[in-house]
Image (tube, rainbow, N blue to C red):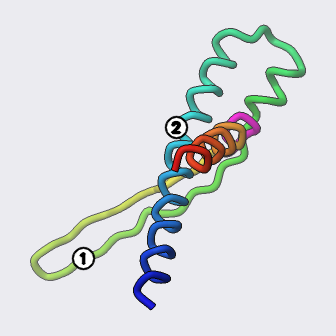
């Protein structure tokens, strides 16, 4: 049973790291496309984003108070390309 739990934890950790690194790569690709592509339909298609945000979340305890947020995610075509590239590399190397 512990072998299955280790595999599940490993795959969940791999998924989280794949998404994080994919979002960073996608953000880099988006910035490069905005800098180097001329104004065209292709640039508009590749760099138009859909955003989702959550927050802010406030917690006030007697001895500690903190606020987290807002947390935003911007998705576009190049972000998805970045996630797929990182997933492909992670699958072939790991």
Task: Examine the image and state in which quarter residue 52 appears.
Answer: bottom right
**Residue placed under numbered mark 1 in the picture:** 60
Q: Secondary structure under badge 1?
A: strand
Q: Residue at x 57, y 57 (%)?
A: 53
- In terms of sequence position, does the residue under pointer 1 or pointer 2 come before the other? 2
Q: Residue at x 69, y 44 (%)?
A: 84
Q: Nearer the viewer, residue 74 or 12?
A: 12
Q: Residue at x 64, y 12 (%)?
A: 35
Task: Examine the image and state in which quarter residue 77 appears.
Answer: top right
Q: Which mark is residue 10?
A: none
Against 41, residue 72 (above or below) is below
Q: Would you say the residues marked 1 and 2 are in contact, meaning their CB atoms lie under 8 Å apart?
A: no
Against 7, residue 76 (above or below) is above
Q: Nearer the viewer, residue 70 or 42?
A: 42
Residue 5: x and y in percent read 45, 82
Q: Residue at x 25, y 66 (%)?
A: 66
Extreme residue in the left direction: 63
Residue 27: x and y in percent read 58, 33
Horizontal placement of 79 versus 10: left or right? right
Q: Nearer the viewer, residue 52 or 90?
A: 90
Horizontal placement of 9 versus 33: left or right? left
Residue 55: x and y in percent read 48, 63
Query: Distance of mark 1 from mark 2, alpha carbons?
Result: 32 Å
Whether the magenta-drawn stretch holds residue 31 is answered as: no
Q: Residues within 10 Å of mark 2 (few under 14, many from 20)?
A: some
Q: Which residues are magenta?
A: 75-79
Q: Nearer the viewer, residue 10 or 43?
A: 10
Residue 75: x and y in percent read 68, 45
Main secondary-structure element of the magenta-colored stretch: helix
**Residue placed under numbered mark 2 in the picture:** 24
Q: Secondary structure under badge 2?
A: helix
């Amino acid at each position: 049973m512990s072998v299955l739990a280790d595999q599940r934890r490993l795959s969940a950790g791999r998924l989280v790291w794949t998404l994080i690194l994919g979002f960073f790569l996608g953000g880099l690709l988006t910035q490069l496309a905005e800098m180097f592509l001329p104004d065209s339909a292709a640039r508009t298609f590749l760099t138009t984003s859909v955003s989702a945000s959550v927050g802010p979340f406030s917690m006030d305890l007697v001895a500690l108070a903190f606020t987290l947020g807002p947390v935003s995610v911007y998705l576009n075509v190049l972000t998805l390309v970045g996630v797929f590239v990182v997933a492909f590399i992670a699958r072939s190397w790991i």
